[in-house]
Image (cartoon, rainbow, N blue to C red):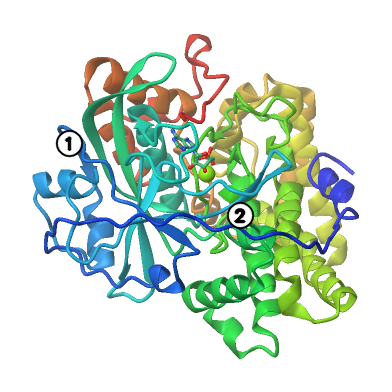
Amino acid sequence: MGLLFSSLDFYSHVIYLSLSTRGSAKLPIYLVFLCKVNFIPFKNQYIRLGDAFYVKTRPASVANPSLIRFNEALAVELGIPVLDNEDVAGIFSGKVIPEGSEPVAMAYAGHQFGGFNPQLGDGRAILLGEVASPAGGHFDIHLKGSGPTAFSRNGDGLAALGPVLREYLVSEAMHKLGVPTTRALAAVTTGEEVVRERLLPGGVITRVARSFVRVGTFEYFAARGNTGEIRQLADFIIERAYPEAREAANPYVALLQGVVERQAELIAQWMNLGFIHGVMNTDNMAISGETIDYGPCAFMDGFDYNKVYSSIDRNGRYAYGNQASIGLWNLTRFAETLLPLFDENGDTAIEVAKQVLGVYVDHYQQVRQSGLLAKLGLLPGDAQTDAGDKKLIEALFDTMQASSADFTLTFYHLSRLSVQASENDEAIRRLFNHMPQFDDWLVQWREHLRRDAQDDTLRQAAMQAVNPVYIPRNHQVEAAIRAAEDRADFSVFHTLHEVLQQPYRYQPGRDRYMQPPEPHEVVEKTFCGT
Ligand code: AMP
Ligand code: MG
């Protein structure tokens, strides 16, 4: 077996469940007094769960907030009226609390790099409130970088401008690439400095999600033995994100099944775009199936199955090629918290959980494989042709690994080749350093294309619809951050954002956004920005 599915085989037999008795803990509650501005039609629900789930927290009032970008299209989708820049900067820096907002810091726990921490929580984030979108669905509006909370531990509760810009660019690019993700509603500068390895300008990003409830939120209550709260939380998230589970014989089993399927699909999508989340701790995995918590994330340039960018991931736990198996590990932690809701008998509950978790590997491989077939312009076939396609795909990844060919450009060039060899082959041959192994592969790929006998133009168009031209390349994101941090110049950020709005369409004059970094531009490490 080649690089493609190997690590899953390693992990599929380690689904391990434990029932444990845990103590309970109570959190302090802070009363807050709010100044009212009448703007956002909040319909808060999370706060109704009760004060075990959060700590009421007023965002810090910053000195001089200034708007970098407001996502008007998203605001319209959410039913938020058009606001002037000053109001936006005030509200989305936390300086002004709009009418109807009941700001809270959410409680959660989490496994960080495999070790359990029973209390993490929103240490630098605040749930401003929730809105019912006119288009349907309920959404959380969450500030990040808005000051200390009861969960800040030794942190300052703040965000530097760089991570704010990174999250805005990458999360909005993910959305346009078609990957479920939190969205960016606003980015502001605070006018204050943040102490990191040096003084940096401060910022606040406002994120939107179907829900910020995480695997770690369930773990928080499981660690305290609070089955009642786990049931409440499960009912809440079913209502919010898995309404179909209500009808099932056991809605909580259906919830686990839904979460398992969405997570498998999500990670398959990441993999097929060369995306590395970087810090897949259980507190950074949303139950809703959206990508959350963009920290040391990156899209790879040259293909490397073991690629790690995160400066804190020294053992490569969250390397590109480990993401699918880590997804299952995290889901197993989630399943453990639901066991009391599955069956009174512990052994029966574990059997149920194992069965549902058992769906993950197949589902992941199916989505990944069909996605890769689409990327290569191949039609799904019978079992025999599928096995041949799988070999072809693995041979391509082996060749990419051997030559460090650029992930995105490989598929970009392939989607512009015709079924006949021609001088157009030269660009991709150059990408593979004219390796004979790749020339052989091209011959085989074309044999598979001929077998499918598709119209060449239609096949190319279909491939171009799933193979992006532009991704938020690390060095471009870094250039946007450098210009903003060092020179207060946001034009680089805005232009990059604009390019990433249409990732699948070639934009004349913008070829440099397609290119991998020059040697002096390479970004080897990314940081959490905490
Ligand atoms: P993350 O790395 O974003 O997943 O954060 C892990 C935990 O650390 C969460 O509980 C965060 O709220 C908390 N945290 C991270 N950075 C800060 C900060 N600057 N101040 C307070 N808490 C923080
Ligand atoms: Mg986090």
Q: Is residue 264 above or below residue 326?
A: below
Q: Is residue 453 visible?
A: no
Residue 72 is left or right of residue 234, and the answer is left
Rendering quarter of residue 397: top right
Provide residue 527's location: percent of width, then percent of height. 52, 26
Of residue 344 and residue 209, the one placed in the foreground of this image is 344
Rendering quarter of residue 124: top left
**Gap between marks 1 and 2, in whole Å?**
32 Å
| Element class at badge 1 | loop
Provide residue 396's location: percent of width, then percent of height. 74, 38
User: How many marks are shown on the rendered structure?
Assistant: 2
Q: Is residue 40 above or below residue 503?
A: below
Give the residue displayed 50% in from the left and 64% down from the top.
52
Provide residue 61's location: percent of width, then percent of height. 21, 40
| Element class at badge 2 | helix
Rendering quarter of residue 255: bottom right
Q: Is residue 251 visible?
A: yes
At label 2, which amino acid type do we have? Gly
* Mark identifier at residue 300: none
User: Mark 2 highlights which residue?
Assistant: 216
Instruction: Name the N-terminal-most of marks 1 and 2.
Output: 1
Residue 467 is left or right of residue 253, and the answer is left
Provide residue 392's location: percent of width, then percent of height. 79, 45
Of residue 400 and residue 251, the one placed in the foreground of this image is 251
At label 1, which amino acid type do we have? Pro
Residue neighbourhood size for the residue with mark 2, other residues' Cα within 10 Å, grouped as few (<14), some (14–19), many (≥20):
many
Residue at the extreme top: 520
Quadrant of the frame with the N terminus: top right
Of residue 353 and residue 476, the one placed in the foreground of this image is 353
Residue 9 is left or right of residue 492, and the answer is right
Q: Is residue 400 above or below residue 257?
A: above
User: Mark 1 highlights which residue?
Assistant: 65
